[in-house]
C-alpha cells in the first residue's frame, strides 16, 4: 500500500546540506518524490510504504546535518501520485519564514583538503562545503541560492559544477563552493594599493613577521592584524588606530598554543573550537601580560579566538612551514596574531575593498583582500563562560540571525535599542531576531549602519512591523529613527524605560512569564521621572514596571563628563563623606579639581544619578586605578582585574541600609576605599561588600513583594565577580536567578527587552 505525505521542515534548514540529506534518506528508505527549498524552509513530498514514511519523519530529526536546527516538522497526508524517483527540485517562492544559516568556521573535511598538496583545493583561500563557510554575511536575500549570494559573479567551473550536482558529494548544492579555477581571487596590496608580487599568503606573513600591520578581509569585515608577540607592532597598531586602549583579542592556531597564557577548561575548549568560532574571554595566567605587553593590560582576562576563515588558517599554515596534512593542527604553534576589528574611530567595521583603502590609509601597511563581496557587516562575537553555560558579551558573527524563541506570538515588532553597543530586534511570530552588534551611535557612519541593519533585517525576514519600540531618551539616534519609521509606516510608537528593557531582555530569553524582581545595574539610562537611573530595583510584570528602589544618588560634577572621569566621581564621594576639602589636594594632577570641589559644595551643575556604574567609578577613582577612562566601563574592568588578581576578600561588616526599605548604604564602603592602603585588597573588598549589600536588598524586597524570581540585567553584570557572588547569595536564599546568556546583559540586549515589552503593550 503506497502512501504519500507532504512534509514541511522549518528552522535553520537552508544552506546546511539539508536537501541532499533528505535525498539520501529517501533513497535509503526507497521513497519517491521530491525535496525543495522555499521561503518557509524545506518542502518535501514523499511517497512509499507507510512504515518507511514513518521512519523518514523520525530520521529527519535524529540524523539532521550538523549545522541544521529543526524548529518544526509538519506532516500532511496527501494522495499518492505514483512518482518513480526521488529528486531535488527547483526552489519555490512564497512568504519568507525560514531561518538563515550562520557563518561557520572551516570544517574538518575542508581543512584536510586545504592542507593536502594533492587536493585540487590545496591552499585555496575560499574552500567551503555544505558544512562550513560563509552564509549570512554573503546572503542578499532568501531563499538561499547562489544567485542570491555574493558568489553570484563566480560561475562554477565544470569540476565544481559536477560536485554541486552530485547528491552524494559534500558540495552538493553548496551555494558558496568554488575552486582556484572559478572562485574569487586573493591578493596582497601594499599601503599604496600596488599589488605585491609572489604568493599573497607568504608575503603577508613575511610582513607580519617584520612587524607590519596587515588588513585582512574576513567574513563580516576586515581585521587589522599584527604579530601579538611584538610589543612595538602592537603599540604601533594602537597608535595608528588612535586613542585605542580597548583590549585586543588574539588569534591562536589552536587551544594548545594559548594554554601558556590563559586557563582553559573543557567547556571553554569546546566553545573555542565550535563552528561559531567566537572570541572567548579566558582567565589570564600569571605572566600573560608580560608575555604579551599591550594586548589587554591590567585586565583579568584575555580574548582568544581560533582561525575560522581559510585565509586565517593559511597564515598559520605558512608560519608552521606549510606542513602537509593535518597533524600540525593539534601541535602548539608560535604564531599569535592580534585580530582586531578594522573600525577606525569607533565607526563601523570596514567591509568593502575601496572603503578599506580609504578608511585604513595610514593604519594598514598592506591589504590581504579578495573580490568576494561582504554583504552583511558583522563583527566577531565575544562570549565567556558563566554559570550554566556561556554569556554573550558581543553578539554578532555566527550568532545572528539566530532567533530567540518567544513564549507568545503577535504582530511584528521592530525595536531600535539604545545608544551604546546598539542592536535592533525584529519579531516574527514566536521568534525574536536580534541584529548583529551595530556599535555606539555617536557618529554618522554608525547611525547609517543602524538604518542599514534595520532595512536588511526587515527585508531578509520579510516582516512588516506593526509597532516600533525605542528608548525613552529623546536624543538617541535610535529614538529619532523609530519616530521616522513609525510616521512613514503609520504605525504606533512605544517608548520603553531603559532598565525595564534590561530586565525584560533577561525574562524574554528565559521565557519567564511570571512577575519578577529586576535588579538593573548599569551605566545610565533615562528614568520615567527624567532622572539618570542606573542602579534600580524593579518589579516587572510584563509591560508593567514599578520602581521599588534605587541605589543612593551620587552627584555628577560637570554632568556627563563625570561618567568618563572616575576622579570626578571620587570627588563626589569625598564630598558626600564630608571630606570635600581633600578633593583639591588628592586630585591636584587633574585640571579643575578645586573647581569641582566648589561645584560640589555649591551643588552647581551636579545632576544626581542612581547609576551603579558611577559607584564603581567612584571606587576606582578613590583607589587611583584610573582617573580618566579611555572607553566606557574601563575603570570598572580594571577594578575587577585587581580584585581577581587579589582573590576573595571578606565584605565590610556592619549595618548597611539607608531608609527602611533595605536600600544599600554604600558610603561606608567608599570611605574604606578612600583610606585603603592595599589597592588589590580594597578592590576585592569593594566587590564582596557590594554583593552582600545588593543581595540583602533584593532578598528583603522579594519577601515583601512575595516574588521568588529575580532577573539580573545591565552592563555591570559583565563583572564576573559581582555576578557570581550575587547569584550564589540569592540562590542560597531560595530565589530563582535569571541572568543574560544568549543576549548580552549590557545595552546590546535592550532591543530584545523593548520588543518583549512592546509585544505585551499592544
Ligand atoms: Zn567544509
Ligand atoms: Zn571550480
Image (cartoon, grey):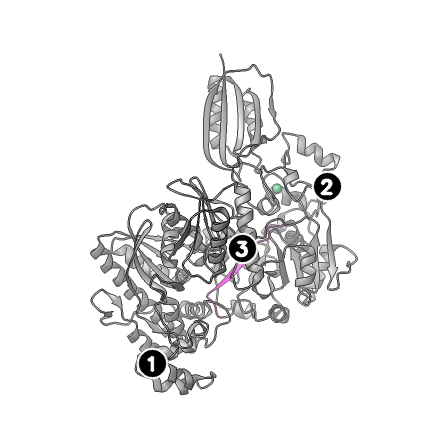
Residue at 65% from the left image edge and 49% from the top image edge: 310
Question: Could you tell me how far apart the alpha carbons at marks 2 and 3 are, in whole angstroms?
Answer: 41 Å
Q: Name the residue under label 2.
A: 120
| Front label number (3 vs 1) | 3
Position in image of residue 589 (x %, y %): 47, 85
Q: Which residue extends farthest right? A: 197
> Which numbered disc, 3 or 1, marks the residue that appears first in the sequence?
3
The quarter of the picture showing ligand 2: top right
Q: What element carries label 1?
A: helix
Q: Name the residue under label 1.
A: 575
Magenta residues, start to end: 298-309
Q: Residue 450 carries which label?
A: 3
Question: Could you tell me how far apart the alpha carbons at marks 1 and 2 are, in whole angstroms?
Answer: 72 Å
Position in image of residue 188 (x %, y %): 73, 57
Quadrant hosting residue 349? bottom right
Is residue 58 within the magenta segment?
A: no
Q: Can residue 205 be seen in this view?
A: no
- Residue 215 shown left or right of residue 464 in the figure: right
Amino acid at each position: 500500500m503506497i502512501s504519500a505525505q507532504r512534509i514541511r521542515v522549518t528552522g535553520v534548514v537552508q544552506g546546511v546540506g539539508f536537501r541532499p540529506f533528505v535525498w539520501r534518506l529517501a533513497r535509503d528508505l526507497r521513497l519517491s518524490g521530491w525535496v525543495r527549498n522555499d521561503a518557509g524552509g524545506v518542502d518535501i513530498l514523499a511517497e512509499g510504504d507507510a512504515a518507511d514514511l514513518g521512519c523518514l519523519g523520525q530520521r529527519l530529526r535524529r540524523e539532521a546535518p550538523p549545522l541544521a536546527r529543526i524548529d518544526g516538522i509538519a506532516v500532511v497526508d496527501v494522495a499518492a501520485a505514483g512518482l518513480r524517483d526521488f529528486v531535488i527540485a527547483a526552489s519555490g517562492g512564497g512568504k519568507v519564514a525560514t531561518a538563515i544559516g550562520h557563518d561557520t568556521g572551516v570544517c574538518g573535511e575542508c581543512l584536510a583538503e586545504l592542507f593536502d598538496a594533492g587536493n585540487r583545493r590545496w591552499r585555496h583561500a575560499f574552500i567551503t562545503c555544505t558544512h562550513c563557510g560563509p552564509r549570512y554575511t554573503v546572503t542578499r536575500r532568501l531563499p538561499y541560492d547562489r544567485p542570491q549570494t555574493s558568489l553570484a559573479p563566480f560561475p562554477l567551473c565544470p569540476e565544481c559544477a559536477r560536485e554541486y550536482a552530485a547528491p552524494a558529494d559534500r558540495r552538493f548544492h553548496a551555494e558558496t563552493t568554488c575552486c582556484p579555477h572559478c572562485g574569487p581571487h586573493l591578493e596582497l596590496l601594499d599601503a599604496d594599493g600596488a599589488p605585491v608580487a609572489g604568493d599573497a599568503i607568504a608575503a603577508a606573513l613575511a610582513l607580519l613577521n617584520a612587524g607590519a600591520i596587515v588588513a585582512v578581509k574576513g567574513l563580516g569585515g576586515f581585521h587589522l592584524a599584527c604579530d601579538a608577540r611584538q610589543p612595538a607592532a602592537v603599540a604601533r597598531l594602537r597608535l595608528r588606530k588612535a586613542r585605542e586602549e580597548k583590549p585586543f583579542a588574539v588569534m591562536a592556531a589552536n587551544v594548545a598554543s594559548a594554554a601558556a597564557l590563559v586557563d582553559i577548561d573543557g567547556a571553554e575548549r569546546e566553545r573555542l573550537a565550535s563552528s561559531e568560532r567566537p572570541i572567548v574571554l579566558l582567565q589570564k595566567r600569571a605572566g600573560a601580560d608580560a608575555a604579551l605587553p599591550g594586548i589587554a593590560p591590567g585586565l583579568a582576562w584575555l580574548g582568544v579566538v581560533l582561525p575560522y576563515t581559510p585565509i586565517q588558517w593559511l597564515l598559520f599554515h605558512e608560519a608552521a612551514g606549510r606542513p602537509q596534512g593535518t597533524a600540525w593542527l593539534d601541535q602548539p604553534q608560535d604564531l599569535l596574531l592580534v585580530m582586531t576589528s578594522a573600525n577606525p574611530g569607533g565607526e563601523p567595521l570596514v567591509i568593502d575593498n575601496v572603503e578599506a583603502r580609504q578608511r585604513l590609509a595610514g593604519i594598514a601597511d598592506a591589504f590581504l583582500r579578495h573580490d568576494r563581496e561582504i554583504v552583511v557587516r558583522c563583527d566577531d562575537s565575544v562570549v565567556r563562560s558563566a554559570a550554566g553555560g556561556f554569556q554573550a558579551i558581543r553578539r554578532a558573527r555566527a550568532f545572528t540571525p539566530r532567533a530567540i524563541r518567544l513564549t507568545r506570538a503577535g504582530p511584528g515588532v521592530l525595536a531600535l535599542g539604545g545608544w551604546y553597543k546598539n542592536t535592533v530586534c525584529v519579531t516574527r511570530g514566536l521568534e525574536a531576531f536580534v541584529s548583529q552588534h551595530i556599535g555606539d551611535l555617536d557618529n554618522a557612519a554608525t547611525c547609517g549602519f543602524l538604518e542599514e541593519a534595520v532595512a536588511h533585517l526587515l527585508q531578509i525576514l520579510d516582516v512588516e512591523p506593526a509597532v516600533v519600540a525605542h528608548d525613552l531618551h529623546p536624543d538617541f539616534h535610535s529614538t529619532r529613527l523609530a519616530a521616522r519609521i513609525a510616521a512613514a509606516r503609520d504605525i504606533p510608537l512605544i517608548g520603553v524605560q531603559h532598565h525595564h528593557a534590561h530586565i525584560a531582555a533577561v525574562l524574554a530569553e528565559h521565557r519567564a512569564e511570571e512577575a519578577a524582581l529586576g535588579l538593573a545595574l548599569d551605566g545610565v539610562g533615562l528614568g520615567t521621572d527624567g532622572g539618570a537611573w542606573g542602579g534600580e530595583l524593579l518589579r516587572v510584570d510584563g509591560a508593567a514596571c514599578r520602581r521599588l528602589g534605587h541605589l543612593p544618588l551620587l552627584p555628577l560634577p560637570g554632568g556627563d563628563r563625570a561618567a568618563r572621569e572616575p576622579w570626578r566621581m571620587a570627588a563626589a564621594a569625598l564630598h558626600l563623606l564630608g571630606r570635600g576639602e581633600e578633593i583639591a589636594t588628592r586630585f591636584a594632577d587633574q585640571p579643575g579639581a578645586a573647581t569641582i570641589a566648589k561645584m560640589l559644595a555649591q551643588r552647581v551643575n551636579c545632576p544626581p544619578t542612581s547609576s551603579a556604574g558611577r559607584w564603581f567609578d567612584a571606587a576606582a577613582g578613590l583607589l587611583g586605578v584610573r582617573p580618566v577612562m579611555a572607553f566606557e566601563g574601563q575603570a570598572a574592568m580594571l577594578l575587577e582585574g585587581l580584585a581577581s588578581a587579589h582573590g576573595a576578600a571578606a565584605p565590610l561588616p556592619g549595618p548597611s541600609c539607608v531608609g527602611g526599605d533595605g536600600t544599600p548604604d554604600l558610603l561606608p564602603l567608599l570611605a574604606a576605599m578612600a583610606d585603603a592602603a592595599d589597592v588589590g585588597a580594597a578592590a576585592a573588598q569593594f566587590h564582596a561588600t557590594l554583593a552582600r549589600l545588593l543581595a540583602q536588598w533584593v532578598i528583603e524586597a522579594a519577601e515583601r513583594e512575595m516574588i521568588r524570581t529575580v532577573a539580573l540585567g545591565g552592563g555591570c553584570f559583565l563583572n564576573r565577580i559581582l555576578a557570581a557572588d550575587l547569584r550564589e547569595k540569592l540562590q542560597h536564599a531560595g530565589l530563582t536567578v535569571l541572568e543574560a546568556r544568549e543576549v548580552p546583559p549590557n545595552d546590546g540586549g535592550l532591543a530584545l527587552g523593548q520588543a518583549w515589552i512592546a509585544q505585551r503593550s499592544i
